[in-house]
Amino acid sequence: MKVYVDKPLCTGCQHCKDVCPVAVFEMKKRSAPEEVNTDTAPESAQWKGQSDPAVVEKWSKVEDGHKHFADENDGTSGGISVGVNGEACILCQACLIQCEGECIHIIDDTNTEYKSIYA
Ligand code: SF4
Ligand code: SF4
């Protein structure tokens, strides 16, 4: 399985990391693109220092107990999620329904792609 995050859409909510049973995701600093752009994301989904304005508009003022768009992770939220261990994915789909930015992509061995839809 290949797992990547469309980085400009990621709020840093950390829900993906919290629900994944096989530790596919790690949170990296927004100010360190060389660490953020290490999964299989295509060029268009890589981090270039700017979040998608529509996602910022939707989530920046939401107060739900965790940070949105913070540079650094504090153990509960912040940073950007990176699919560092996609090979371990068991396609349980838990992350796909928890992703605020609807930005997780999973591609299986038959090239079928699964995308997140926030529920
Ligand atoms: S679908 Fe894969 S990446 Fe997502 S939570 Fe399940 S095992 Fe982890
Ligand atoms: S759940 Fe989605 S928006 Fe939240 S940190 Fe993970 S990839 Fe980013």
Image: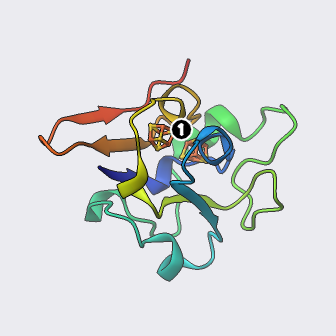
**Which of the two residues, 95 or 21, is positioned nearer the viewer here?**
21
Q: Residue at x 35, y 33 (%)?
A: 115
User: Where's the C terminus, which quadrant?
Assistant: top right
Residue 16, placed above or below residue 46: above
Residue 5 pos. (x, y %): 43, 52
Q: Closest to the observer: 76 or 19?
A: 19
In the image: residue 55, left or right of residue 104: right
Q: What residue appears at the point 49 percent right and 47 percent down from the top-left corner?
A: 9
Locate residue 2, reporting x and y percent. Answer: 30, 53
Residue 12, compared with residue 97, is above or below; it is: below
The residue that disc 1 covers is: 101
Q: Residue at x 33, y 43 (%)?
A: 106
**Is the residue indicated by label 1 positioned so its CB lies within 8 Å of ligand 2?**
yes
Q: Mark 1: which amino acid?
A: Gly
Q: Residue at x 59, y 61 (%)?
A: 26
Across and down, in percent, residue 72 comes to: 75, 67
Quadrant in the rendering for residue 91: top left
Q: Residues within 10 Å of mark 1 (few under 14, many from 20)?
A: many
In the displayed structure, does residue 93 sit left or right of residue 105?
A: right
